[in-house]
Amino acid sequence: MASLLRSLASAVLLALLAVRGIEGTEQREFDYFLLSLLWPGTSCAATRHCCSDNACCRSSPLPEFTIHGLWVDYNDGTWPACCTHSNFDIKKITSLLPTLEKYWPTLSCSSSSLCFGGKGLFWAHEWEKHGTCSYPIIQDEYSYFSKALDLYFKHNMTEVLTNAGILATDDKKYPLKDLAAIITRAFGATPQLVCRHGALDELRLCFYKDFKPRDCVDGADVLANKQNNCPKYVSLPTYTPGLTDISESIGLAMYNPLSVA
């Protein structure tokens, strides 16, 4: 009986390590990168209160996808997290700050949770949770944020959709399969599309460790409603900066798009 209990305990521990990673423990090397992009028309629709940090409250609407994060995943659908006790050092990315403010802003007034307690900048959250797990390909804050920006500009998804006639509007919905096909042709691999209440919320692009495009693990399910909450027709909504209760006007419940990843 004691042997059986020890075996069960070991299995549970291994499962925990595989699914989420235990903060501060050594985790196996990741399999691929995932660049997560947010559509601001959907994310900013949840804005109820404004503050100086929230890019949804700027005087002009954000006109393009913004970066959520550069993540590292395993092929089995799990991922490592919080791999080292490395506190975020904003001084290392000083030269990148103007570009990060524009293309990788926070879309919330709430501070982000940090790996080892407390709250901090959205960038600190992304570095500590995901960036620290990107070793040995990426080894410091500057490399992490600059590589994410490089990928964002190289694969300009806003431009790709605009050139294909897919425009931000509250008056039209687009076939999900058309969006997936357009992105796949331009990117060279199958993306993941994530929706919220019929609106495109997140676009995910996957990369091998040498940053060449690859199909996302769940790419074959890009059109699967249960996987991604996307209906057959989706919208790319617009929003009015600083307007409270926007979410009620398009049927979105209030949520923080940056609260879980």
Image (cartoon, rainbow, N blue to C red):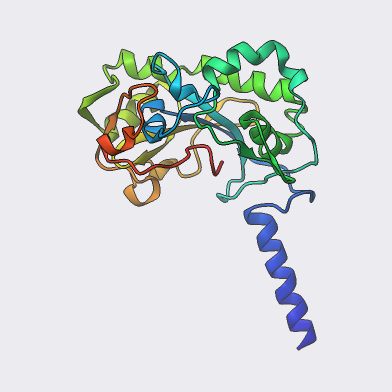
> Which one is in front, 37 or 227?
37
Image quarter of the C terminus: top right
- The answer to which image quadrant residue 120 occupies is top right
Q: Residue at x 28, y 19 (%)?
A: 167
Image position of 109 with respect to 60: above or below:
below
Residue 90 coordinates in the image, percent (x, y): 74, 22
Q: Residue at x 74, y 45 (%)?
A: 116
Is residue 94 something one can see in this rendering? yes
Pick out the residue farthest to the left.
171
Q: Residue at x 62, y 47 (%)?
A: 79
Is residue 150 something one can see in this rendering? no
Position of residue 162 in the picture relative to residue 94 (left or right): left
> Which one is in front, 60 or 205?
60
Pick out the residue farthest to the bottom.
1
Residue 177 coordinates in the image, percent (x, y): 28, 34
Image position of 22 with respect to 130: above or below:
below
Q: Residue at x 74, y 81 (%)?
A: 5
Residue 97 coordinates in the image, percent (x, y): 65, 15
Image position of 13 with respect to 108: above or below:
below
> Which one is in front, 141 or 225?
141
